[in-house]
Image: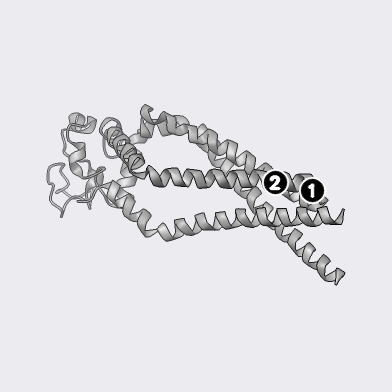
Amino acid sequence: MESHVQSIFFCIKFLMVGINAVITVAGFVLLGFGVWVKVHGDSILQILGSRAGHFLNVGYFCIAAGCCLALLGLVGCYGVIKESKLLLMLFFLIMATIFIGEISCAIVILVFQTIVATVFEEEALYLLKNNYTGYGDKNFASYGWDSVMAAFQCCGLNNYTDFIQSSYHKLKGRLYPKSCCHDPTSPDCDGFDTSDATIYSKGCLNAVITMIKKNSVVISGVAVGIAIIEMLAMAISLTLFINLFRIT
């Protein structure tokens, strides 16, 4: 009976080490993304504009969260291997705090999703009108928007009218750039022919929303998977703590 209990205890420890390894890797990935955002901050501002500078603070958050997760995973692994009650309880408390924080953020996003969507839409339209200068231009803003419109087969944020009275319109005198066309090399893509046969009728906002809806199952699955891993890690760490407490 005792050997059976020890075998179960060993399996739980092994599972806990695996979960913490996943948490550590996720932390380093998040840390790397945060560093990338900060290093390429100037380029991002050229694409999005100075008004979007506050979004670069996400880089600091990713760096801090990545460091915390990586450190937490290492602490969890070390606590399991050394069978340290203190480290296991510390792991449980920190993970519980992170989990509660994530739930709180999710609730806030769900409650204020309309406001958040409106703010992003206004920001994106402002950036399109003021930063885009033309198809094939070498600046980051033009390259970024051309890539988005080509990838999603869309034109402007809502439609081609977003370019009217924009910096691009005043500079080039065209109603829309070549990246709005089904075939940028076609003679019909003259910047004035607005028929559906020539340019994309849908805006990029709706195209992105449609893409998110199509992949909502995957996104939801990833979110649920992360939540399950976190709850499992908390449950195992608490189980190990209780067993070690009983042994001693």
Query: Quadrant of residue 213 in the image?
Result: bottom left
Q: In the visual, does 42 lie left or right of 204?
A: right
Q: Determine if residue 239 is in view.
A: yes
The three-letter code of the residue at mark 2 reads: Phe
Above or below, comparing residue 130 to residue 10 in the picture: above
- Number of the label disc, if any, that sits on residue 91: 2
The three-letter code of the residue at mark 1 reads: Lys
Query: Quadrant of residue 14 in the image?
Result: bottom right
Q: Nearer the viewer, residue 169 or 28?
A: 28
Task: Give the image location of residue 148, x and y in percent.
Answer: 33, 46
Q: Nearer the viewer, residue 7 or 37?
A: 7
Task: Give the image location of residue 71, x and y in percent.
Answer: 68, 42
The residue at 36%/30% (across/down) is 49
Mark 2 and mark 1 lie on one chain; the one further toward the N terminus is 1
Q: In the visual, does 184 lie left or right of 11?
A: left
Helix, strand or loop under label 1: helix
Task: Give the image location of residue 2, x and y in percent.
Answer: 86, 69
- Judging by the rendered image, the residue that carries numbered circle 1 is 85
Q: Estimate the spatial distance between the alpha carbons at disc 2 and disc 1, rounded to whole Å.
A: 10 Å
The residue at 74%/48% (across/down) is 88
